[in-house]
Amino acid sequence: MFENYKSPAPDVILELMQQFRADPRPEKIDLGIGVYKTGDGKTPVMQAVKDAERQYIEQEQTKAYLGLAGDADFVDRIRTLVLDDAVSPDCVRGIQTVGGGAAVRLLADMLAANDKCGRIWIPSPTWINHVPISKAAGLEVVTYTYFDPATGQIDFDGMLDDLGKAEANDIVLLHGCCHNPTGADLTLEQWRATAALIAERGLLPFVDIAYQGFGDGLEEDAAGVRLLAGTVPEMVISTSCSKNFGVYRDRVGTAMIIGDPGAGIDKAREVLLSAGRVNYSFPPNHGAATISLLLSDPTLTSAWKSELDEMRQRILGNREALAQTLRSATNSDRFDFVRGHKGMFSLLGLSAEQITQLRNEAAVFMPPDGRMNIAAINEADLDVIGKGIAAVIR
Ligand code: PLP
Ligand code: TYF
């Protein structure tokens, strides 16, 4: 009966990863999948994580199953990292998940299981998996205006106009920071206005934060989600440790529910746990246990923070160098907006045809939407990237 299948819609980012690996050109440049790279094109394990892992393995007593909710200490430390004291710990319920992706899925499942839940409003554009995951969970998806490709900036009026059409108990998905794929983040003023609209219309915010520490810093990048958490009565949050701890393949994330302790958050958490159970039973231990140990040790924590800050500084340096390179290569200020973007990515505003041409002619690999992984740029490649882009927009 297996011949009966139709091919699922491809994930163009994962497809690109395969194409890159298969391409024989030695000079090829990978600016596709969202993985941080050092100046020599590597994605090493962070030193503080390596040290925490060593310590953890030394002290590991058992590999018996974790509980469905994972490592409670880990979840609590991530709650503090993301929310600090924006809301009382009594008002937060969280669980460990298989990366940020599964956090999004379990929260979507949990929301879809609630008869009161309306549609989910998702920014256009957004992370490649937000819409498929929401639909797979059975949510009705509507998109809201977010980005103006002509300016490389947020279309905030368009966003508020669209969200003004949302109805009570609709969900609004927001990127906590370092918007994927655009790189355009809300200012704190814009977060404030968004929070006011959400509160006024009785919407439920769903904040997905996967790049805390890659934009302006750990605290700065959480300012929006903290502001929102302090404004609205209920919200949900998905977090990922893939990027800021560099533990991509260990699959570490959390799903959190915020609300009044007397108003159903424990029930909601049970639904979340059950969604995990029917999908994969228990979460894996290693990555979360390592991060829990790291965050419980002040020396390791401070070492991790400085490494993360170095990574962030490298991205900022890459942004500046890219802006300068594109300015001189194209003789225009068209791409200056990459300087003001946050995090790993910028959406450059190139067409799918131009992206294909760039791949064919300059061996520069980017997904068809024209998203560039700025964190993967290597100084030695800037010239090729600049000339390649100048050639395709000519
Ligand atoms: N959410 C966003 C916005 C992302 O960009 C990503 C991808 O890294 C994820 C969630 C999922 O990350 P993870 O690898 O932890 O599943
Ligand atoms: O957007 C990215 O590149 C990362 C990694 O199905 C990723 O978020 C890409 C595709 C995917 C899962 C994760």
Image (cartoon, helix red, strand yellow):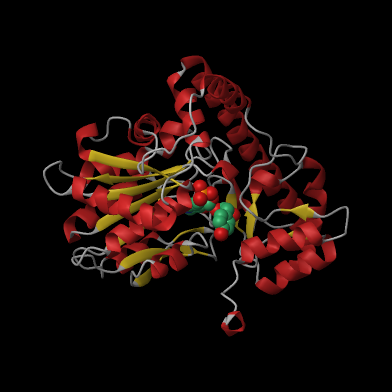
| Identity of the residue drawn at 40% across and 70% down | 135
The relative height of residue 22 versus residue 77 in the rendered view (above or below) is below
| Identity of the residue drawn at 66% across and 37% down | 317
Determine the residue located farthest toward the left in the rendered image: 262
Q: Nearer the viewer, residue 213 or 304?
A: 304
Q: Nearer the viewer, residue 218 or 340?
A: 218
In which quadrant of the rendered view does residue 161 lie?
bottom left
Task: Please provide percent x and percent y for residue 24.
Answer: 87, 59
Determine the residue located farthest toward the top in the rendered image: 299
Q: Where's the C terminus, which quadrant?
A: bottom right
Q: Where's the N terminus, which quadrant?
A: bottom right
Q: Is residue 318 visible?
A: yes
Q: Nearer the viewer, residue 65 or 165?
A: 65
| Identity of the residue drawn at 27% across and 46% down | 257
114 vs 262, left or right, is: right
Q: Is residue 179 visible?
A: no
Q: Nearer the viewer, residue 196 or 7?
A: 7
Task: Please provide percent x and percent y for residue 306.
Answer: 56, 24
Task: Please provide percent x and percent y for residue 65.
Answer: 43, 39
134 vs 345, left or right, is: left
How many marks on residues?
0
| Identity of the residue drawn at 59% across and 37% down | 246
The relative height of residue 88 versus residue 362 in the rendered view (above or below) is above
Task: Please provide percent x and percent y for residue 80.
Answer: 35, 31
